[in-house]
Amino acid sequence: MMIDTTIPLYALFAANLLILAAAVLAILRFQRMLRNSGAFWKSPTGAAIQMRCPAQQENSKLIIHEIAVLQRTVAKLCERERVQPQAPSLPSKLPLRHAARMARHGASIEDLRKSCGLNIGEARLMRKLHAGRSAAAAGTAVQ
């Protein structure tokens, strides 16, 4: 008879353990959902959803109206001044060819800057690219 009463007690104990484990898992899952929810409301998407309250909607309507007024003002100023976008002017190839020729003949960086209107970086690049060409060409012509 002792055996018959212990089996239901063990089964009841095992069922209680399973229910306790399920409760612990449910609590852990709920905590994770709360953390994710807090992170969501701090994100830009959550902030945008929160803006749906009436006071903030009035502020957003006011901001949109101000932006529209500014856009109209800019359009009127552009029409009045006849501002048109201009394409950047490309430098003529002639000064670059002249600079290359000067670099082949051994011109200094300062000479390239003054006579061709190059900046220091461009003048250095011209010297690196073209200064060795005359020597290389002369070397191949002799052989």
Image (cartoon, rainbow, N blue to C red):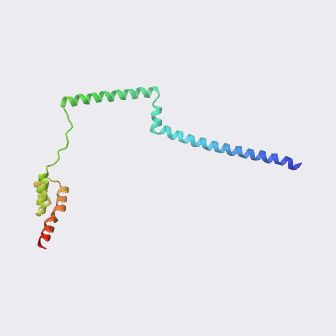
Query: Residue at horizontal 12%, vertical 56%?
Result: 97
- On screen, 80 above or below 142? above
Query: Residue at horizontal 45%, vertical 31%?
Result: 51
- On screen, 13 above or below 41? below
Query: Residue at horizontal 67%, vertical 42%?
Result: 23
Image quadrant assignment for residue 122: bottom left
Q: Residue 60 placed where, x, y %?
A: 40, 29
- On screen, 113 above or below 30? below
How many numbered tags mark residues here? 0
Q: Is residue 57 left or right of residue 31?
A: left
Q: Residue 107 placed where, x, y %?
A: 11, 61
Q: Residue 30 placed where, x, y %?
A: 60, 41
Q: Is residue 58 left or right of residue 80?
A: right
Q: Is residue 84 left or right of residue 7?
A: left
Image quadrant in which the C terminus is located: bottom left
Image quadrant assignment for residue 127: bottom left
Query: Residue at horizontal 14%, vertical 51%?
Result: 93
- On screen, 9 above or below 102? above
Q: Residue 94 placed where, x, y %?
A: 11, 52
Instruction: State the residue lying farthest toward the right.
Output: 1
